[in-house]
Amino acid sequence: MNKILTGALLLLFSSSAAAQTPRDSIAFATAQWRTADLGGGAECRYAQIDMFGSRQSISVATYPGRRFTTSIVHLDRRAESTSDLGKAAGAEIAVNGSYFNVKTFEPVTFVLLDRKIVGRTTPEEAFRTNGVIAFKDRKGRRMEIFPCDTTQYADVARRYRSALAAGPVLIDGGKVVEYTSGSSFYTRRHPRTLIGKRADGTVVMAVIDGRFKGQGDGATIAETAYIARQLGLTEALNLDGGGSSTLWTAQEGVLNHPYDNRRFDHEGERGVPNCIVVRR
């Protein structure tokens, strides 16, 4: 039985996470995943699962964090597709990054690259940007994900080499973070992107397709957090979603169904100014 399936079954019986229904847990645990070995302990998988009274189309990439280099790629006021950014970086895996101004392509969240701040979180983003992905070493083999607000960015800049703010935080210390916001960003189903870690150091990137009725309905933030917990994550952060949501691997190409061309295929990528890339 694969690790994700085993973890999901354990969570079904022992997790303190707020499950949507037992039926959803069973659906996830027994899903038929299409899996590809990416080498070096990395793999990717895809499944369509009937959960939450909807069809969830989920793409996942996992890799041992200590064996791979993880880093942030950031462009200055321009955008390229996640797959092109991944290829240019010589990456094995790439996932879209955080929120940005779709007209100017400037980041609207805190971005730290090689100890230089190149993006700051705007007041408008405070309602959802409450966490960071941070790296202490140049090779990015010590990735940390933790809650963080604007008052803590100066400390992050002192302690870490690179960092990217996003949100909301989905899992913190093994527990699902619950939100009471009535914002449609939280309560409506959208395409979602997340990144997280398991207790053993495995890094997990996932995209939940959305806005494709009956094929990939999308998830609320609560449903996204639930899926993150079913993936066995002890820490997880929501990244930019919507048309930006893209998960790519050098071996398999774009895994999910990006929304920007409004077709349930792998061609609808949106240009983004930053992404997270993984190299061997």
Image (tube, rainbow, N blue to C red):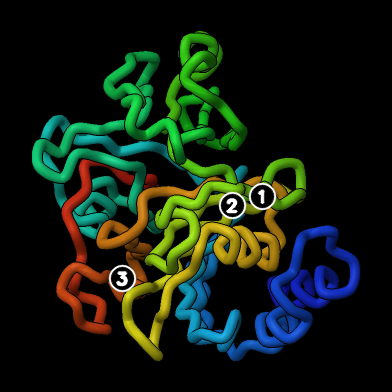
Identity of the amino acid at label 3?
A: Val
Residue pointed to by mark 2: 203
Drawn side of residue 135 relative to residue 244, left or right: right
107 in relation to 225, above or below: above
Q: How many numbered marks are there?
A: 3
For the point 36% across and 34% down, the residue is: 125
Residue pointed to by mark 3: 254
Residue 118 can be seen, yes or no = yes
Q: Nearer the viewer, mark 3 or mark 1?
A: 1
Drawn side of residue 5 relative to residue 250, left or right: right
Q: Quadrant of the N terminus?
A: bottom right
For the point 53% across and 15% down, the residue is: 152
Gap between marks 2 and 1, in whole Å?
Answer: 22 Å
For the point 59% across and 60% down, the residue is: 222
Of pointers 3 and 2, the one earlier in the residue sequence: 2
Residue pointed to by mark 1: 178
Of pointers 2 and 1, the one earlier in the residue sequence: 1
Q: Position of residue 113 (x, y in %)?
A: 35, 23
Identity of the amino acid at label 2?
A: Val
Residue 36 can be seen, yes or no = no
Of pointers 3 and 1, the one earlier in the residue sequence: 1
Comparing 211 with 73, the one in front is 211
Contact (Cβ within 8 Å) of mark 3 with mark 2: no
The 10 Å Cα crowd at callout 1, few under 14, some 14 to 19, many 20 or more, is some
